[in-house]
Amino acid sequence: MGATEPGAYSIFVYSKGAWVLHMLRNMMININTMDDNTYFTVMRTFHSRYNDKPTSTREYQQTIEDLTGVNLEWLFDQLVYGNQISRYTYAWRKEQLADGKWKITIRVRQADVPISFKMFISLKVTFDDESQKRLRIVVTGDVFTLELPIFDKKPDEFAFDDLSSVLCAVAEEPF
């Protein structure tokens, strides 16, 4: 979604800040345990550093970087200072291997953003025994294809951005 599309003003002015915080929280979640303590540590640290003082978005970014050791300049440039919303169209297929294990291949088409745009996306695989496995990938480029780790169990369902943690439009297509 570009800045000139209908509804974009409302998203960029009223909703974007909340979405960015939601996205950051989901990026900091331990995808295996769903523990989001890192995010709340960042929030408490930011509050204690700047309580009753003028502050900026860059200082919030710096707090995250100080605590996680991860450079997030690219992310803030895209999400906070940029005005584009990605559109993802994904496909997936499962294949049983000769040893009885399972392989999932995914393809993601990314549109409405520059080719250099990248984003962390959460995935969820549900198996035929109803157990689940969550993963996180980084999608970049116009078309992104990836084989997930091999699974011992038969995949039954696949969810792209299962935590709804990215401000984007998502559609599924056949592989």
Image (spheres, rainbow, N blue to C red):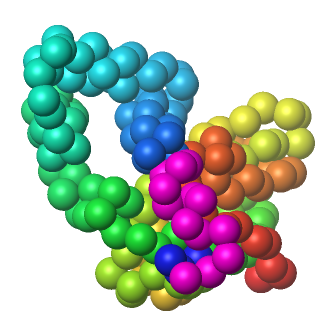
124 is higher (above) or lower (below) than 73: above
- Horizontal and vertical percent position of residue 158: 76, 55
Percent x, y for residue 140?
Answer: 42, 75
For image coordinates 21% across by 36% down, the residue present is 60
Q: Quadrant location of residue 103?
A: bottom right
Question: Is residue 136 visible to the viewer in this orientation of the structure?
Answer: no
Instruction: Decide if residue 52 is on the left or right side of residue 17.
Output: left
Quadrant assignment for the N terminus: bottom right
Name the residue nearer the viewer: 175 or 85: 85
Q: Which residue is drawn at the image coordinates 14% and 33% (left, top)?
A: 55
Boundaries of the magenta span: 4-16
Where does residue 122 sit, x and y in percent of width and height? 56, 49
Whole-percent x, y for residue 49 in the image: 11, 18
**Residue 172 magenta-drawn?**
no
Residue 104 to residue 89: above or below: above
**Residue drawn at (39%, 86%) of the image:** 115
